Image (cartoon, helix red, strand yellow):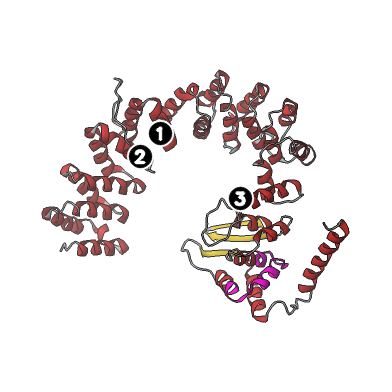
Amino acid sequence: MMNKFVLRFAAIASLTTVIFMWSCSGKNTTEISNETNLIVKKIEKENVVMGSAVGSAGITPEQYENFEELKKNASKEELLLLTNHPNGVVKCYSFWALALDKNADLFSIVKKHINDDTPVETQFGCIKSTEKVGDFFIDLVNPKYENSEIKKLSQAEFNQLDSLLIYKKNNLYAGYDAIENAVPTEYLYPKVRNLVIKNHNQSALVTLSKYKNPNDIELILKNKAKDENPESGYYSTYQAIQNFPDLRFIPFLEKNLYQTLDNDHFSGEWLELYTAIASYKNQKAVELLKVPFTKVQHQNIKEYHIKFVYEAILANRCTLYNDLLWNIWKNEHIITLEGFEYLLNVNAGKVLELSKKELLPAYQIKTEKIVPKITKSIFSENLEETMLNFILLNDKEVAYNIIKYKITSAPVNDFEMYCEKTASLKNPYFNDALFKRLKSADNPYIYLPIVETLISFKDKSINNKILEMRKKNKNMNEEWGSDSLDEILKKNNIK
């Protein structure tokens, strides 16, 4: 085993090599070819890490073409040297190129950069952001992110990396993430507690709460991140309480809840506050979760409170909260696919009636108890389609009325689903509604699905009526929608 002197000498020698390679004069050593150096300079000039498609149009930027040149021309040895380049963007692209080599020793490179907090600007798609080089390296090879082209660290290597991030001082986001996701052990406890006390580390506070040590209650209660707003700064405190719902935190949560009720803007911290309250799963929690329904002063802010209560309850499912969930759906019209599936197991008959009311506002809810049929086939990734499928299975008449209503009134985002459902049912009951919407439709995403649905009936009289309707509705003869309609008609030989 090397002694401390040898290790220190090796580190100094390594640093000296880097400094020599990238001198202040900008001259390159013979270890980097002139061709590679020209590519590096182009990357430096743009100075943004870009993906293969950026902006709303998804155009391949010149910077990504520079990266492609780097991959094609730089040797493995050059790329390895370039991961120590003074420019952060060059480092990132060089490591990215190495990560495409299944034989590269990426783990050793990542370990050397866990203190690399050089900021780099990135753009992937329309999203621009700034991150640190070390975080970029770690995210790229994180085994939880799937990418068949990029070599990932093994889970064992990543676990070892997490350990290094916890015990070795660094300013990376990954370091905070490693601390927060750490599995509590007796050995780790003093380190985590020390990070809270000395560094005010918010991620460490969340991990500390997992030990559920009564000696840490005061430490959690006194915690507040730096924030100009006197009511904010408790995000990690609330998360800590979620892990350790001790009754001694209740007065603190109640006090902070009541402070939110007169706010004329919402805060993302409220979700964590309500989730902390819901984690108790007792009558006091029910009482506090009911507060925003009647005591929020500004009605436009009330909806945020209720949405947060809803999410908090789903994260802490308990029969004590079921009445609140039903109330939120029936009176506030807040329902998600996750909530739908949960309530379906609680009372399927009630879900059926509320689904009808949700999709058909004029529907009058029936109180008689029924036991509806449920099959796997009703479920879709789309909540509205799942509800409709459930109703179709149990009440065809109401389902048909819903489809007819939606054909005439559904917004663009939901409309195509109802057209597809109509086409699959192949029932002339919907034709009048389809033509009624077609008569005034001005959006191609409305009239094109209608035309395709009507054509699917394979009825010559219907096809002729489509042509007549096109003459009356001038919107169907404008811009790209008109061209697409021409193609549809031509494909189906409709003249």
- In the picture, the quarter occupied by the N terminus is bottom right
Which numbered marker is on residue 155? Answer: 3
Q: Secondary structure at mark 3?
A: helix
User: Which region shows up in magenta?
Assistant: 69-91
- The amino acid pointed to by label 3 is Gln
Q: Secondary structure at mark 1?
A: helix
The answer to which of 299 and 423 lies nearer the viewer is 423
Which numbered marker is on residue 379? Answer: 2
Q: Is residue 80 magenta?
A: yes
Q: Which residue is mark 1?
A: 341
Q: Is residue 54 magenta?
A: no
Which numbered marker is on residue 42? Answer: none
Q: Residue at x 72, y 49 (%)?
A: 164
Residue 87 sits in quarter: bottom right
Label 2 crowd bin: few (<14), some (14–19), many (20+), radius 10 Å: some
Residue 270: % across, % down: 58, 34
Q: Is residue 27 left or right of residue 152?
A: right
Q: Cα distance, mark 1 to mark 3? A: 33 Å
Q: Residue at x 31, y 46 (%)?
A: 417
Residues marked 1 and 2 touching at CB (< 8 Å): yes
Question: Quick one: label 3 or label 2, which is nearer the N terminus?
Answer: 3
Residue 313: % across, % down: 51, 29
